[in-house]
Each structure stands twice: as C-alpha cells, then as structure tokens.
Amino acid sequence: MLHATITTAAPAASLASLTRDYAVYNEWANQQLVDWLQAKPAHLADEAVPSSFAGIKQTLFHIWQVQSFWLGALQGREPEIAYGAVFMGSVEDVYADILQQSAAFTSYIRSLGDEELEEICYVDIPFVGEVMRPVFEIVQHTMNHSSYHRGQLITIGHQLGWHDAPMTDYMFYLLRVK
C-alpha cells in the first residue's frame, strides 16, 4: 500500500469552491495547451490524425463548441450545437476563441453565489432530450469533457512527434499553480 506524508493541511473546501476551482482550472489548462500548441508549426493543426475529430484544430473547435453550449444553457439561453460542423477559421482564431470562451465560463461561474451553483438548470440536449440538473453538475460535466479532449490533443501531438506537452493535471494545478 502506498502512503503519502502530508505536510500541510488542505484548505477548507465546499461544493461551491470546488465548482469555481474547476472552472478556473479549466481556463488555466486550456491556456497551457494553447501556449504549447502555438509553439508548434501552425500547418500541423490541420493535419488529419486519427482521433474523435480530424486533428488539432477540429478538436479545439469541439471543446469550444461544447463549452459554449453549456455556458449558454447555464445562462438561460437556448444554446445550439452543430455536431459535425467543421471550423473554417484559422488555428489562431480557434486558439483565441477557446481562451475567450474559457474566460467567459470562469467569469460567469465566479459571479454565481453558493446557492445559485446548487440551483436546477433546465437543458434540452439534442441527443438526450430535456433534462434538469444542478448547475454544479453541469459545470463538472463541462470541465470533465474539456479535460477528456485535452488528453486527446496531447495524444494527437504525440502522433505528430511532439513529446513535450505541458502538465495539465488537476492535482498539479491545485498543488503547484493555485
């Protein structure tokens, strides 16, 4: 059995603080990934690599699109998502879009009071139907979805010969960045 020595006490946490931390973490992790990708040859962002989406640019577009969908739902808008849509802008455009959207998501979540994070949100999900879930669950789902696809982006990078991806692990963020 592995035992770790804890030298400092963990800060007090609540569901609300965890939810806010997760949004901030997502923004930070997306920034780390974009910084890494911007140091790579831009033309490779369009390189077709076997994955859920056709390469780096389309995977980033998917993350941006899904974060936008869920933020819209949380803000009471009727969000739309076009599955299978292809991003026609430049790689620099998608970098800017995902970073701006991640900051907007964080800003919105930080603006909510503790009680608001536990309120029920109605969402009509295209492939599921009408659902009602607490705000904090939607945030958790959205950030988890983005983490999943960040992992795919790093795997795509490996397939392109890039083996210097940044650490974007949540615990790393909590212990070394926050």
Image (spheres, rainbow, N blue to C red):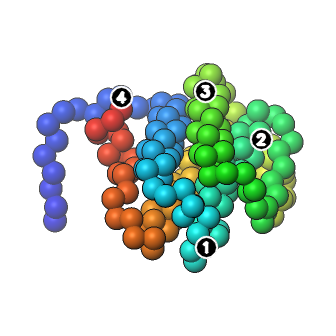
> What is the x, y in percent for residue 165?
37, 57
Tell me: residue 146, above or below residue 25.
below
**Residue under numbered circle 3:** 107
**Residue under numbered circle 4:** 12
Question: Looking at the figure, which quarter contains the N terminus?
Answer: bottom left
- Amino acid type assigned to the residue bearing label 3 in the image: Ser
- Are the residues tagged 3 and 2 within 8 Å (C-beta)? no
What residue is drawn where x is 74% and y is 57%? 87
> What is the x, y in percent for residue 75?
76, 33
- Are the residues tagged 3 and 4 within 8 Å (C-beta)? no
**Callout 3 crowding tier (Cα within 10 Å): few <14, some 14–19, many ≥20:** some
Q: Earlier in the sequence, mark 4 or mark 1?
A: 4
Q: Quarter-wise, where is residue 129 in the image? A: bottom right
Q: Relative to 138, is 128 on the left or the right?
A: right
Tell me: residue 95, above or below residue 59.
above
- Amino acid type assigned to the residue bearing label 4 in the image: Ala
Return the mark for residue 9.
none
Q: Earlier in the sequence, mark 3 or mark 2?
A: 2
Q: Quarter-wise, where is residue 149 in the image? A: bottom right
Q: Earlier in the sequence, mark 3 or mark 1?
A: 1
- Amino acid type assigned to the residue bearing label 1 in the image: Ala
**Callout 2 crowding tier (Cα within 10 Å): few <14, some 14–19, many ≥20:** many
